Amino acid sequence: MSGKAKKATSPELGRKGAYVLRNRAALLRSTREVLATKGQSATIEDIAEHAEVAVSTVYKHFKDKDALISATILAAFAEWEPWAMSFAEEFSDPLEQFVMPMRVFVRLNQTHPHNAQTLVNYFDVIAQIVPQLQATMLGHVKSLTKAKILTISNPEIAAKNLHAILTFAVINQVKNPKATENDADEAVRIGLSMLGISDAKAKKIMQIPFPKLKAQRSS
């Protein structure tokens, strides 16, 4: 019998890959749960203990705590985004479809309070993954510009500025106990000016009745 190690077959590699992905997903869920209870004080050791894995296992998947937090935030956003976009489905007007998820986002502290608090606690990490978080919005802005629904010279800069306004609106909702839903919507209205939308048009869009939202459980 040859002393050489037997090469893994494709099914074996597939099972191994699926196992790694399952472990990674479980680790991200555990991280989200720890962040929800411990916030900024959460350590890699806390996360490993909650996930019932060795600290070394965490580092097999992520090079450091920031990488783990970034991946956790992106995973949470990937779950949140389709849910938020679903609120636009009842509208036929492209601008109304575009704006409704923004109004949902600025209410993040109401619907997904743990995610909103994580945004505040780890804003330095958020800043590093802004391009990924802006991707869908930027795509919409470019599409609306191409369709001549928006008339702006630099869609990318406009989208970045709008995203910044919305993000700080969420932070205000978390940090300011006196912040209201009207304040959140006002931030959206002001942000629309970054896209060349007139104040009259923005006000008309913002007058559309907003659905009643409930706090969502993170999976």
Image (cartoon, grey):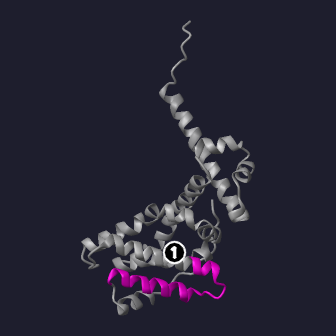
Which residue corresponds to the image point at 48% horizontal and 28% vertical from the top-left? 10
Q: Is residue 16 visible?
A: yes
Looking at the picture, how far across and down is residue 23, in whole percent? 62, 44
Looking at the picture, how far across and down is residue 89, in whole percent? 43, 72
Q: Is residue 106 visible?
A: no
Q: Is residue 151 left or right of residue 187?
A: left
Q: Residue furthest bottom?
A: 200
Q: Which residue is mark 1?
A: 167
In the foreground, 32 or 84? 32
Looking at the picture, how far across and down is residue 116, in whole percent? 60, 71
Residue 110: quadrant of the picture: bottom right
Helix, strand or loop under label 1? helix
Position of the C terminus by quadrant: bottom right
Magenta span: predominant SS is helix
Please say if 96 is above or below 31. Answer: below
Q: Which residues make up the magenta segment? A: 171-196
Please say if 117 is above or below 20. Answer: below
In the image, is residue 202 part of the stretch drawn in magenta? no
Q: Is residue 36 left or right of residue 140?
A: right
Mark 1: few/some/many CA within 10 Å (<14, 14-19, 20+):
some
Amino acid type, label 1:
Thr
Q: Is residue 203 left or right of residue 37?
A: left
Which residue corresponds to the image point at 36% horizontal and 79% vertical from the top-left? 95
Position of the N terminus by quadrant: top right
Which residue corresponds to the image point at 33% horizontal and 85% vertical from the top-left? 197
Looking at the picture, how far across and down is residue 26, in whole percent? 64, 49
Which residue corresponds to the image point at 36% horizontal and 93% vertical from the top-left? 200
